[in-house]
Image (cartoon, rainbow, N blue to C red):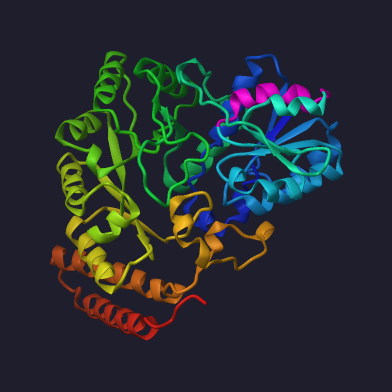
Amino acid sequence: MDLLLTHGYFLYDDPKELQVMKPYAPLGILYLASHLRARNFDIEIFDTTFSSWPELQRCLWSTRPAVLGVYANLMTRSNVVRTLRAAKEAGWKTMVGGPEPGAYVEEYLAAGADAVVIGEGEITLEELLPILNGGSLEDLHRVHGIAFRGEDGCTQRTPPRALIPEIDGQPWPNRESIAIERYLEVWRQHHGRGSVSLITARGCPYECRWCSHAVYGQTHRRRKPASVVDEVEWILERYSPEMLWFADDVFTIHHGWLAQFAVEMKRRNLHIPFECISRADRLNPQAVDLLAQLDCFRIWIGSESGSQRVLDAMGRGVTVEQVQTAVELCKSRGIQTGMFLMWGYEGEELDDIEATIQHVKRSGPDVFLTTVAYPIRGTPYFDEVGERVVGTKKWAEGSDRDFQIRGRHSRQFYQNADRLLRAEVELQHLLSLEMPGGDGTIVELRQRIDQAREGIKATFSEVEA
């Protein structure tokens, strides 16, 4: 074996995901595996999703050491760090990549990584593997897109790796390396239908200030429609899922591409419900008609705020009115909408929170998800607030989600704002139904609204220290 790939996400250790139970395969390392196998490397995958730390640890100690590659993001940092440390103790060469390590090169090298892969990994690993598997470490300087420690112990960074210009030349992710059937089983058990994910493009060209472009860059490299339909057809024949998840950052960027994709799906008589993510400014009547024709049942829209002032500060490049129009369009075509919202972005005040509440009530999405803004290292947002960022945990035990920003409202304040939003939306929905016998619930909701508003007033002066 030349390389063992893993990712450090353990589903059964994640309390929030245990409530949701919508796991998807780790496409990133599956793409790496298919690329390297096509070049005659011997690649194995240890998929941690349904496994456990003791099982991964046993694998590291019972397998003849080679090179271990670990995918890391901010959710999995602590597991990745202990995996790297355990692997070094067991005699493995180690490397780490993914969206986070490039912003924490020194930390990951100190945690046990022999090399940090920065950016897109396929070509980098193709060059790096022979060196880690017995080549001269001096040759590391010739591999673009990595960081490592030289003989003097100092960190060395090579020039950035150029992105793959033509991603249609890349093989599909090697799903056969892992138990996709297990993912489908969990989906069907909890939701009545199984789902498989795929991507049609890499990168996002937009400039949201809180968003990281660490792996695929601020680009948009789209696969040809026929290539994507080939993969869809294979997935349907091989796994028979009841739905798909198009995991692109923005599925509807190119309307011409979407039209060609729809034509090809129709030509092959392929029909499969799916959900995807879009931006409000990339949804117009023609695009939404195509999505409905394609059996899209839900579109997730990054709304983030109902305050135009906050949206402009985020660099979102959309208006509140565009979001509301996009939701209305989707509803008119029978497509559900999901909305992402973010509390606590720099400069947000009470008026902005009220605007967000009114915006959600006006839009009426089928579902909305909220988070409190956190600055990801390496983003413009982090640069903006970095001098006030305070870590609340040791680096190896936490993540960027744990950052506090001195002077910002407290977490309790935003919890009250969230309670207010949810109670207001629930009350509006109940009143719109005009259901008899709902007076008791209405009274209860109004009490919750009053309590949330009192909570906001009580915690308004509380700030993160």
Mostly what secondary structure, the magenta segment? helix
Front residue (pair 108, 329):
108
- Identified at 15% across, 71% down, the residue is 436
Does the magenta portion include 128? yes
User: Is 25 placed left or right of 89 in the picture?
Assistant: left
439 up-or-down from 325: above or below: below
Determine if residue 426 is in view.
Answer: no
User: Left of 216 or right of it: where is 145?
Assistant: right
Whether residue 373 is visible here, answered yes or no, is yes
Q: Position of residue 329 (x, y in %)?
A: 16, 43
Stretch in magenta: 120-135
Q: Is residue 133 left or right of residue 370?
A: right
Q: Residue 277 lies in magenta, yes or no? A: no
Is 278 in front, or is 369? 278
Q: Identify the image quadrant of the N terminus.
A: top right
**Residue depicted at x 29% and y 71%:** 423
Across and down, in percent, residue 112 comes to 77, 45
Vertical placement of residue 75 versus 426, above or below: above
Q: Is residue 226 above or below residue 377?
A: above
From the top left corner, tell me how far across and down residue 403 is, in percent.
54, 64
In-front residue for pair 50/454: 454
In this view, 304 is above or below 39: below
Residue 121, x across and y down, in percent: 60, 30
Q: Which residue occupies 45% across, 17% down?
A: 168
